[in-house]
Image (cartoon, rainbow, N blue to C red):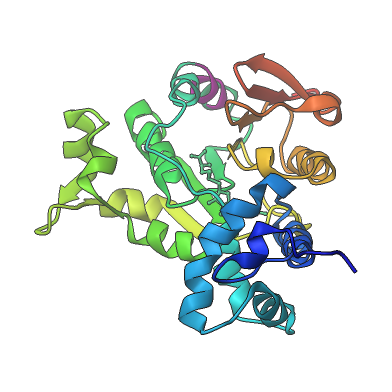
Amino acid sequence: MADDSSDEFMRREFPLSTQDFVFLRDFAEAQVGVVLSLDKREMIYSRLARRLRSLGLADFAAYCRLLARAQSAEVAYFIHAITTHLTAFFREAYHFDFLLETAFPQIEKSMATGRRLRLWSAACASGEEAYSLAMTVHEYGRFANWDVRILATDVDTEMLTQACAGIYGADRVSGMSVERQRRFFSRLDDGRYRVTDELLAMVSFRPFNLIQPCAAGEFHDVIFCRNVMIYFAESHRRALIARFASMQRPGAYLMLGHAETLEQGGAQFYDTCGRTIHRRQGEQ
Ligand SMILES: C[S@@+](CC[C@H](N)C(=O)[O-])C[C@H]1O[C@@H](n2cnc3c(N)ncnc32)[C@H](O)[C@@H]1O
């Protein structure tokens, strides 16, 4: 048995033993693929301490037992607490510029998809990325008679509820041009902003866990999977890239986050053609 007596985490309001941390770390990886190294113990403590207080639990050992119960409703809360949801409208703007200047004209010209455009925001958090895709489609302006769908998924159902509502504080919207604000948002009485019905109708939000296999569905012309794989174990990253490849036709695009690369596993499926922009290989 490990001696925890010198461990300062054991002297806190809610004792968090190394054993409890290891349980939470393994549980997180099994549920969502996220790797929590030992230096994340402080983060785990601070993100969950309030939860333990409100649940009336004495220590993390009790919290681990709660999570371990079959079909524990606490799992959704735990996932929300340990994942990072930082996002913004038109974050990493070069991807949206690339759509306007390169990807959309290519897709329009090739017509390979039969006047259908399928975009996927694969870890959409509170929805800003998906609505930025919808705005970009509008700004491009030449898909008016096309069947355009934007799929937006996330494992965190709390984030999906926010995303579906399409309501954002003024601070979230203020970074966009006044023209975009006027065209794509209406101002609510409480000072917040709501995306237009037109944008809402273009996006379908669904729960989806990127580390789980999925049934073959439609091909995606562009996948945005940004700032999520960076938290995954390498085995999950590799499996996910292979799965994306199976869901894209040659010539389709995969956009990753600014600190993410395809590494060895992806080079057999995609060519890199810009900053974190990858193109599915194969005959078109
Ligand atoms: C930092 S946000 C990225 C948001 C957006 N893609 C961007 O780049 O601005 C990461 C999101 O990934 C989600 N996430 C984490 N693990 C996931 C998984 N296994 N499957 C699906 N989404 C996951 C989190 O819930 C979170 O909303």
- Horizontal arrangement in the rendering, residue 281 relative to residue 199 (left or right): right
**What residue is drawn where x is 76% and y is 61%?**
18
Examine the rendering and report whether any part of residue 131 can be seen: yes
- Horizontal arrangement in the rendering, residue 173 relative to residue 16 (left or right): left
- Horizontal arrangement in the rendering, residue 79 relative to residue 203 (left or right): right
| Magenta region, residue range | 102-107
The quadrant of the image that shows the C terminus is top right
Q: Residue furthest front?
A: 6
> Is residue 146 magenta-colored?
no
Vertical comparison of 113 with 284: above or below: below
Q: Position of residue 233 (x, y in %)?
A: 78, 44
Report the number of numbered marks.
0
**What residue is drawn where x is 62% and y is 22%?**
276
Image quarter of residue 82: bottom right
Image quarter of residue 13: bottom right
Vertical comparison of 277 with 198: above or below: above
The front one of 79 and 53 is: 53
Q: Position of residue 182 (x, y in %)?
A: 16, 38
Label the magenta part by its dominant secondary structure. Answer: helix
**What residue is drawn where x is 19% and y is 53%?**
192
Examine the rendering and report whether any part of residue 219 can be seen: no
Q: Residue furthest left?
A: 189
Image quarter of residue 238: top right
**What residue is drawn where x is 65% and y is 58%?**
8
Vertical comparison of 133 with 5: above or below: above
Q: Position of residue 60 (x, y in %)?
A: 65, 73
> Is residue 105 magenta-colored?
yes
Q: Position of residue 205 (x, y in %)?
A: 49, 58
Vertical comparison of 19 with 122: above or below: below
The quadrant of the image that shows the N terminus is bottom right
The front one of 76 and 47 is: 47
The front one of 19 and 77 is: 19
